Image (cartoon, rainbow, N blue to C red):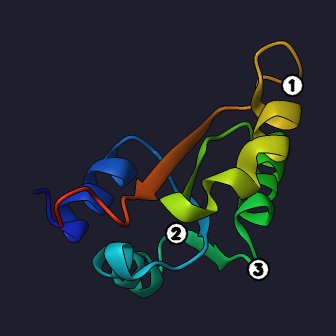
């Protein structure tokens, strides 16, 4: 598995500089790395839909792509903002989603 700092460095190398999400224990290393990095924008959202909206707003303001992180149990909270903001036939706003996989079968 890729280390959090390595993943963050790769994202930054691809000019991903804005991170919005709902902290998750499965992504705690990644959340810690993002929180400690002073070169990026990072906001913790009240819910997953709000994180998607923040990422969409960032793109509208800057033309750049944001990363939204969440746990898989919060994916349902993103359905409306994803389909109404990021769908190619609506506003076609690009986002990167990093989703923790909680309750993996057999674990």
In the rendered structure, which disc, 2 or 3, sits on the residue that comes first in sequence? 2
- Label 2 belongs to which residue? 40
Of the 4 image quadrants, the one containing the C terminus is: bottom left
Q: Residue at x 81, y 32 (%)?
A: 83
Between 76 and 53, the residue placed more toward the observer is: 76
Q: Is label 2 in a helix, a strand or a loop? A: loop
In the rendered structure, which disc, 2 or 1, sits on the residue that comes first in sequence? 2
- Label 1 belongs to which residue? 91
Between 106 and 23, the residue placed more toward the observer is: 106
* Residue 90 sits above or below residue 18 on the image: above
Q: Is label 3 in a helix, a strand or a loop? A: loop
Q: Residue at x 46, y 45 (%)?
A: 15
Residue 79 seen in this snapshot: yes
Mark 2 vs mark 3, foreground winner is 3
- Label 3 belongs to which residue? 46
Which percent across, then down, holds residue 90? 89, 20
- Residue 41 lies left or right of residue 93; in this view the side is left
Whole-number angstrom distance, CA of label 2 to CA of label 3: 19 Å
Q: Residue at x 36, y 59 (%)?
A: 101
- Residue 81 lies left or right of residue 68; in this view the side is right
């Amino acid at each position: 598995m890729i280390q959090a700092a390595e993943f963050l460095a790769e994202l930054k190398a691809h000019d991903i500089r804005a991170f919005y999400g709902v902290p998750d224990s499965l992504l705690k290393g990644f959340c810690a790395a993002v929180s400690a990095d002073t070169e990026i924008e990072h906001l913790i959202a009240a819910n997953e839909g709000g994180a998607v909206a923040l990422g969409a707003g960032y793109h509208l303001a800057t033309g750049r792509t944001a990363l939204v992180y969440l746990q898989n149990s919060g994916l349902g909270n993103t359905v409306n903002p994803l389909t109404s903001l990021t769908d190619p036939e609506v506003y076609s706003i690009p986002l990167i989603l990093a989703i923790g996989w909680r309750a993996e079968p057999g674990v």
